[in-house]
Image (spheres, grey):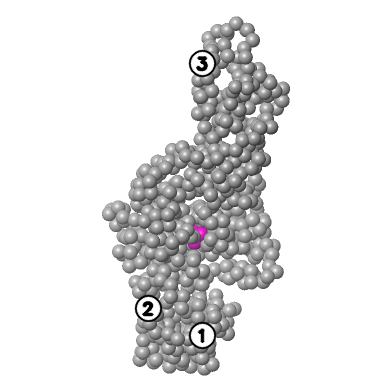
Amino acid sequence: MAEKRLLIADADASAWNVFRNALGEGWTVVGTDSCHAALAESETHPFDAIVANAALPDLGGAELLNRLRQINPKIRRYIAAGVDLKEKFMSNLLGGDQFLAVPYDPATLKHSIEREFTADYGMNSAVRELVARIRTFPTIPSLYVEVSNALHDPNATTADIGAIIAKDLSMTTKLVQVINSAYLGLRRSITDPTEAVGLLGFETVKSLIMTVKLLSQYDKVKPVYFSIDSIWRHSTNVARTAKTMATLETNDPDCAGAAYTAGLMHDLGKVILAANFDDQYHRAHTMARKEKLPLWQMEKEVFGATHGEIGAYLLALWGMTDEVVKVTAFHHEPLRSGDKTFTALTAVHVANVLEHEKVADPSGLLAPVVDCDYLQSLDMADRVELWRFARREGNTNRKDAKAPPGKIEARPAAQTASASVAETVQTEQMEPARPRPNFAAFWKWLGLGLGIGTLAAWSVWLETDKAPEVATVPAVVNQDPAPAPASAPDPAPAPAPAPSAQLAILAADPAPEPTTPALAAPLVKTASPSEKTGIDKLNLQAIFFSAQHPTALINGHLTSVDQDIADCRVLDITPSSVTLEYQHQRKTLKLP
């Protein structure tokens, strides 16, 4: 790294040495004790960064930074003050200023200053120049600061955090909406913010507070080409899907948490551009539709930076983690990250595409597509269909999952990446929210019944007629059944259907166990030893394995240990096989 120059304006000369010692080699630190001296020094020599103490005499640190911003928009600017004054000064400064706490902590200030110089998150000169022109840069939400400070207390409880949030009606409302969403699948409604905090976790709640409060600062911004509500809905959906994917692939809470946070914040740059450059951004939308280019590419042509890069710059100013900043900057161009393994960036990049597949842009903008080269570099191009499945199902903790054959449309990676909006939306509409029941076994049995003879088939219908509560009825009613004979055959006793036929229907569409045990007993007593058992009729399609909650996809239905599928009890699930029991017989099914 080439030598950098930093100007520190602080009346306490001992602070100058703190910076010199903390930054070490590669940095030249020049100290001044007043605003006027700092201005004179900056006009004489170029600097890469400046730190101004808020308590400086004459102009004050905030005014010094604002003047330097006009002289040199590219300079990195830091205001230094006590932690209790952070919100006050950050709300009064213009875009691009960062905060350093006084007294200075050497490790913190080194990281804060060097992170922009050592990590390239798309924050080039064009980004900095654009940020310098922003007049309505959002401020750090006070509720976020209050909750963050409370969490620094090791004894903080969910009740403490819930009480803080309860003071803010709008935040409480949003939190309750999120916790009661269908995605979480709760069986009862949650209205208490304390309980919501306990279920979501501290980090998730912090991310939600940040996003909700940032968006609320732009309530009066109503561009004709999108709505703030649409940004919120899309961002929460991306966050959920990204978290699901990260959990499935890594089972790492940190990765899943970063994916959720970055998913919530990945589109904040759109709101900032709309609030500050409405006419230009409207033109970018119009040109993107006309030239059939993704919006982020047109943003780069018009502004020299994408909404992802602008949002990343904002998050970096506020001290968000490097991972979240990187994901936000590169969520449309993940290959630029240099990542070689699955990360939160992978999750947000793909989740963003999947959510755009689900809901087409009403203005006709071209939907983003999966970066095939990036996924191929990770050797994960074949996982896209599984991730589509996971998004629909909300499945997590299934690291060794394989895409169920015949249940999800399998497309080559290149075709997936180039799919048009119309194609992807049509796919979403055609595919049900859950896998369709597999009726292949039913039709196979029906053919067998017809082969045995009309008499045997009729006996089955008679048996069904007598006991409509038997679990097989829903499966037959859900399809167009074969028409019953016009006249009843002679009431001669007919042989009962083999258990394999009955079990095949149950496998196709499982229903509650029969309420009358006597109805099930004849099926066992009249079974022919030459027939296959119910286990042989089961088809193992996928295993979603984790040490705590292994599950398997059998005949289109998810099941776990100690659950029943077609009268067979699941005894064990390993990464490659499932062991079942039927009538005291055991059999192991293995993935193909």
Give 529 or 97, whichever is nearer the viewer: 529
Amino acid type, label 2: Lys
- Contact, CB < 8 Å: mark 3 with mark 1? no
Q: Nearer the viewer, mark 3 or mark 1?
A: 3
Which percent across, then down, holds residue 277? Answer: 36, 66
Q: CA distance from mark 3 to mark 2?
A: 83 Å
Element at badge 1? helix
Q: Please check the rendered image and state whether residue 160 is part of the magenta-colored stretch, yes or no.
A: no
Which percent across, then down, holds residue 579? Answer: 62, 39
Q: Is residue 323 above or below residue 12?
A: above
Q: Earlier in the sequence, mark 3 or mark 1?
A: 1
Do we see residue 226 in this rendering? no
Give 105 or 591, whichever is nearer the viewer: 591
Q: Determine crowd level at label 3: few under 14, some 14-19, many 20+ residues with C-alpha closer than 10 A.
A: few
Which percent across, then down, holds residue 130? Answer: 36, 71
Q: Which residue is mark 3?
A: 451
Element at badge 2? loop
Relative placement, left or right, of 207 versus 295 is: right
Element at badge 3? helix
Q: CA distance from mark 2 to mark 1?
A: 23 Å
Do we see residue 25 in this rendering? yes
Q: Which residue is mark 2?
A: 74
**What's the residue at 57%, 42% (across, down)?**
577
Q: Can you say which quadrant of the picture contains the N terminus?
A: bottom left
Q: Determine crowd level at label 1: few under 14, some 14-19, many 20+ residues with C-alpha closer than 10 A.
A: some
Outermost left residue:
291
**What stretch of residues is rendered in magenta?**
259-263
Q: Which residue is mark 1?
A: 22
**What's the residue at 41%, 86% (across, down)?**
5
The image quadrant that residue 118 belongs to is bottom left
Amino acid type, label 3: Gly
